[in-house]
Image: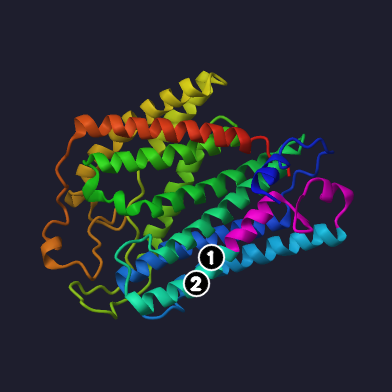
Amino acid sequence: MAIPAILARSVRLDVAARPTRAPWFLYSVLFASTSVIVGVIWDISWHQTIGRDTFWTPAHLAIYLGGLVAGAACGWRTLQVTLAGSPLDRATAVRVWGFSGPLGAWVCIWGAFAMLTSAPFDDWWHNTYGLDVKILSPPHALLAAGICAIQYGAMLAALAWRNRSTTDRGELHVLYLFSAALLLINSATIGSEYLQRWDMHRSLFYQVAAGVFPFVLVSSARAGGGRWPASAMAFMYTAVTLIMIVILPLFPGRPLLGPIYIHTDHFLPPAFPLLLIAPALAIDVAMHRMGRARDWRLAAMIALLFVVTFIGVQWPFANFLTTPWARNWFFAADRMPYGVPPSIQQRWYVLEPPDHIATGLPLAALAAFVSARCGLWWGNWLSRVQR
C-alpha cells in the first residue's frame, strides 16, 4: 500500500472508545526507545573515553536491544490483530501486504529493520575506513533514521489510543510527551556537531538550532494539546541528559585506542543540555494565547520568540560554561575526551568569536519560521491520528 494511502486511512475513525490504559506494546516501544537513547549517549561517551575496541560493547547492545524489542513487540501485535484480532482491533488497524496492525506498530517495524540493517553496515564501515570523523556517516544516518522511526511509532501509538478515548487520558498524554522528549534528545544528538559549546556565539549554531528544534517542539505540542506540552518535553530532555551527566562518570573507563593525549579513568558525561526550556515556554505561551489563529501568523510569532529567547539564554550561558564555575560534576565543562590534542586543549575554554551576526540571525529566524510552519502542519495531522 502506498504511503499516502496509509496516512489517509490513519485519521478520523468513528469507533467506540477503548479503555484509557495504554496497551502493552506501547510500553514495550517506550522501553525500546529509552534503551536506544541511553545506548546512543553511552556509545558517544564510550568513544570519547575508551575508543572503539569492539562492536559488541554494552552501549551497542543497548541500542540494538531497543531495535529488537520494538520490532518484536510491534510484529507480535500485528500478528495478533491479523490472526486473532477483534472486529474493533481490525477496524482501528492499517493493512499492509495482507497484515493488519496499528500505524505506530508499522512505523516501529520499519525502524527496527533500519536499525538492525545498520549494525553490520556500521561494523563493515569501521573495519574498512576506521573511526568516523563525523557523527552522520552513512551507517549512522541509517541508524538515526531507524531510531527516529521507533520514536515516532511510539508517539503515533500513544496518540491513536488517546484520540479514540473519551474519558481521562492523562497516562497516555504523559507517555506521548515522554516519547516526544526522546525524539528531542535524538534530534539534539544528531545535530550536536553544529551545536558545540565553542560555537554558541556563532550564527550557524543558531541557524541549525532554529531549523531543528521548532519543528519537534511545535509539532509535538500541537498534536499533544494541553497547557505546557513543549515545556514538558524540554524539561524531560533536560532531566534525562542531566541524569546521564551524573551517572556515566560513576563508571570506570580508560583509553584503549591511540593516540592518547589525556589519561581518563572514568566515562565522560555528555555535554550540558541546551537551554531549550526557555523557547519551549515561549512556544507554549504563544500557542495558548493565539489559539487556532492562522498557522502562518502563529509560525511567524513562534519563530521570532524562539530565536529571541534562545539567544537570550544560550549566549550568556556559553560565557558561563567557559568559567571555572562550570568545571564540576554538574556542568561538566572540564571533561575532555582522551584524543584531544594539546593545541585544542589550550583553547578548550575559548569561544569562537561572533561571525556575521547581523546577517546570520535573520537567516536563523527564517529557518525557525519554516521549521515552525512545517511543525504546525505535521502536528495538525498527528492530532487526527486514530489508527
Q: Is residue 13 left or right of residue 159?
A: right
Is residue 364 magenta-colored?
A: no
Q: Residue visible at 26% across and 56% down?
A: 328
Q: Amino acid at mark 2?
A: Ala
Give the answer, above or below, for where 298 lies relative to 83: above
- Comparing 380 with 264, the one in front is 380
Q: Residues within 10 Å of mark 2 (few under 14, many from 20)?
A: some
Location of residue 73 (image quadrant): bottom right
Q: Can residue 121 be seen in this snapshot?
A: yes
Q: Is residue 64 left or right of residue 310?
A: right
Mark 2 highlights which residue?
A: 119
- Comparing 91 with 31, the one in front is 91
Q: CA distance from mark 2 to mark 1?
A: 7 Å
- Comparing 80 with 224, the one in front is 80
Element type where label 1 sits in the image: helix
Give the answer, above or below, for where 252 lies relative to 147: below
On the image, the x and y values in percent for residue 91 come to 83, 46
Question: What number of labels is visible?
Answer: 2
Location of residue 79 (image quadrant): bottom right
Label number found at residue 318: none
On the image, the x and y values in percent for residue 69 come to 63, 66
Q: Which residues are magenta?
A: 85-112
- The C terminus: image quadrant: top right
Mark 1 highlights which residue?
A: 115
On the image, the x and y values in percent for residue 351 come to 17, 47
Q: Residue visible at 11% across and 63% down?
A: 343
Q: Residue visible at 63% across and 54% down?
A: 107
Q: Is residue 303 left or right of residue 262?
A: right
Element type where label 2 sits in the image: helix
Whether the residues at callouts 2 and 1 have beta carbons within 8 Å, the answer is: yes
Residue furthest front as drawn? 2
